[in-house]
Amino acid sequence: MSLTYLNNRNLWLLALSQVFGFTTAIVNVFLSGIIGSQLVSIKALVTLPPTLFIIGTAICTVFASYIMSKFGRKFGFISASIASSLSSLLAAYSVSIESFMLFCISCLLMGVGMAFVHQYRFAASESVDKENIPKAVSIILLAGILSAFIGPNIANLSKDLIFDQLYVGSYLTLACLNILPAILLAFFKNIDESKENRSFKGRSYKELISQPRFLQAIVASAFAYAIMAFLMTATPISMHINEKFSLNETGIVLQWHIVGMFLPSLITGRLIQKYGHNIIMYCGISFFLISFLIGYFDQIFLNYLISLIFLGMGWNFLFISGTSLLVITYRSEEKYKAQGFNDLAVFSTQALGALSAGFLLNITSWQTINLMCLPFLAIILLTIWRANRSEHS
């Protein structure tokens, strides 16, 4: 059996697992804020469940990398899949007994599982040659398109599965989806078996961050995720709760937003190979600016739809270019350390974005929170400029 065959098999197993594993994030973005609004009377707390989901991811990124450095990616991925399924069952139970606190805990635990799912892209990058890393990352993210349609549709169709227990069926169904990666990844083969490479050795975090390109990669990915999470978390509340759009209309906007997040992955990897990381990052920033501009107009369905599609496209270009740039800035013995630190930065800023969304939307407006994102784009531009200057000096 050739190594090439094994690598390709791993890549497609990871892509299929991404379809089902990432559905957890989609369902939580779609429902957890709405469920929170039904379980708690304090408006500022309605986005606490989706925020705790992201916090769970953020605080466990380094832990996920450490577990896989000790026991291999296969063990980490399968264990996380099982844990996520159990956490979904806990969410179903908490909704059935109308416990806001227990629902928050279940969202936090599902977020822990997502810390491992987000490592799929790094496992994919290790399964291909260096020049094909952008394409491999794109394939993993492209699988999220299916999650975009599976998540909201299954959550909506199964919400009345249990009589007189709204949304319990949504999380029961999610538990079934969450267990599928454990079955698929039973056939995954760890590429890196050596203890030398499965470690946290190498340069210090300070030395890694001092590299302009490493910092550029982290800042682009982190702020792209923070902006996207900030506006995406606020969208169901703004549309369904404040503007009284139906759950179906809200779901359509989120579906197409996620299509915008992942469909460009068909070409993003090739564009990075052809034009370089910087140009694609500039394109991502431009897409974000278009999203903010449209979001500043009247809050009608079409404006929400177009704005969220461009929001997703901006995230795609910045996140894929940031991830593929990151993996060429560290040494092989540093990969778990660098990847864990990167994801800690990415999902910590994402958590801050999501946590502030409900509060800021409550005290300001949809137009205002779009304008609040502009300074973060300026910071991304600054890190690109600094990295370019350091290379030419």
Image (cartoon, rainbow, N blue to C red):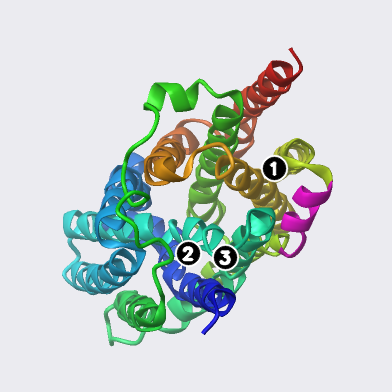
The C terminus, quarter of image? top right
What x and y, as percent, mark residue 112? 29, 55
Which amino acid lies under the numbered mark 1 shown in the image of this protein?
Gly
Is there CB contact under 8 Å for labels 2 and 3? no
Residue neighbourhood size for the residue with mark 3, other residues' Cα within 10 Å, grouped as few (<14), some (14–19), many (≥20): many
Q: Which residues are magenta?
A: 266-274
Q: Secondary structure at mark 3?
A: helix
Front position in the image: 365 or 342: 342
Report the residue marked by disc 3: 140
Task: Pinpoint residue 58: horizontal percent, then vertical percent.
Answer: 35, 44
Q: Evaluate if marks 1 and 2 touch, with contact meaning CB atoms under 8 Å apart.
A: no
Amino acid type assigned to the residue bearing label 3 in the image: Ile
Residue at the image position 34 percent from the left and 69 percent from the top: 74
Mark 3–mark 1 contact, CB under 8 Å? no
Q: Amino acid at mark 2?
A: Ile
Residue at horizontal 61 percent and vertical 42 percent from the top: 322
Residue 128, relative to residue 276: is it above or below? below
- Magenta segment includes 268: yes
312 sits to left or right of 63: right
Q: Is residue 302 one of those drawn in magenta?
A: no
Disc 1 and disc 2: Cα gap in Å? 21 Å
Residue 26 is marked as: 2
Seen from the viewer's position, the closer of residues 101 and 297 is 101
Residue at (44% x, 22% y) in the render:
207
Closer to the eye: label 3 or 1:
3
Q: Nearer the viewer, mark 2 or mark 3?
A: 3
Residue occupying the point 55% across, 76% down: 12
Q: Is residue 326 above or below residue 316?
A: above
Neighbours of disc 1 within 10 Å: few (<14), some (14-19), many (20+): many
Q: Position of residue 8 (x, y in %)?
A: 58, 75
Q: Secondary structure at mark 2?
A: helix
Residue tagged by mark 1? 295
